[in-house]
Amino acid sequence: MKKAAGKRTKLLRSRAVERRDAASAPKTGDKFVIRPAESHDIGAISALDARITSLSKKQHWQDLLARSKSLDFAQFFLVADAPASSKSLLGFIVGEIRAWEFGSAPSGWVYALSVEPGVREHGVGEALLAAIEAEFKRRKITKMRTMVAKDSPLPMLFFRAEGMMAGPYIQLEKDLT
């Protein structure tokens, strides 16, 4: 059983590398363009997030965008646009470089990633992840991390297919109510 699981993992990683290599091609073309988020994107970002999470957090996204524009903060906020469409926002990703938390060397953290449900499985998520990975690599970061809820199979499958796996830390929590 372990051998079969190992073969499946290798196959998923191999496919993820192929997709990532394809996604690392220029981020322009007929389908979409990856670019830094701008203030005029916040309404569409907030609306997409609200459709996915059922929570409206417009001020949160505005605050993250302001931080990403700060020269002294290593945060990245990218969007995928469909240039030929009036409803152009296809997805977004937010990440940042965090250092020495819990004894961890500097690493890139993917904080949020969301793609319009109607365009999933068309390379948008993979291209966004590849773009933020390139930002981390440009700053000499050699590790990328994220957190996924145990009861969220779609994000778990996506990140695993992109070559991410369990890391050396276990998240612990306590209710404070």
Image: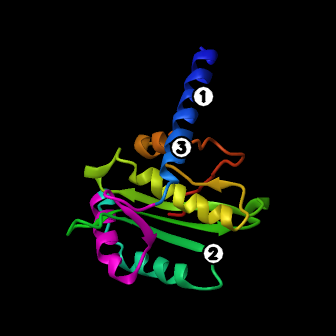
- Residue 162 has which mark? 3
Sequence-earlier tag: 2 or 1: 1
What is the count of numbered marks?
3
At x 58%, y 29%, the residue is: 9
Q: Of marks 2 and 3, which one's residue comes earlier in the chain? A: 2
Indicate the secondary structure of the residue bearing disc 1. helix
The residue lying furthest to the top in this view is 1
> Which residue lies under the disc numbered 2?
74
Q: Badge 1, how many Cα within 10 Å: few under 14, some, many 20+?
A: some
Q: Which class describes the residues within 10 Å of circle 2: few (<14), some (14-19), or many (20+)?
A: some
Residue 104 position, x and y percent, is 76, 59
The answer to which quarter of the image holds residue 45 is bottom left
Q: CA distance from mark 2 to mark 1?
A: 32 Å
Residue 10 is tagged as 1
Residue for point 63% across, 75% down: 74
**Range of magenta residues:** 27-51
* Residue kind at label 3, given as amino acid type: Glu
Kind of element beneath mark 2: loop
The CA distance from mark 1 to mark 3 is 11 Å
Point 78% across, 61% down: residue: 105
Compared to residue 90, the image places residue 41 above or below, namely below
**Disc 1 or 3, which lies upstream in sequence?**
1
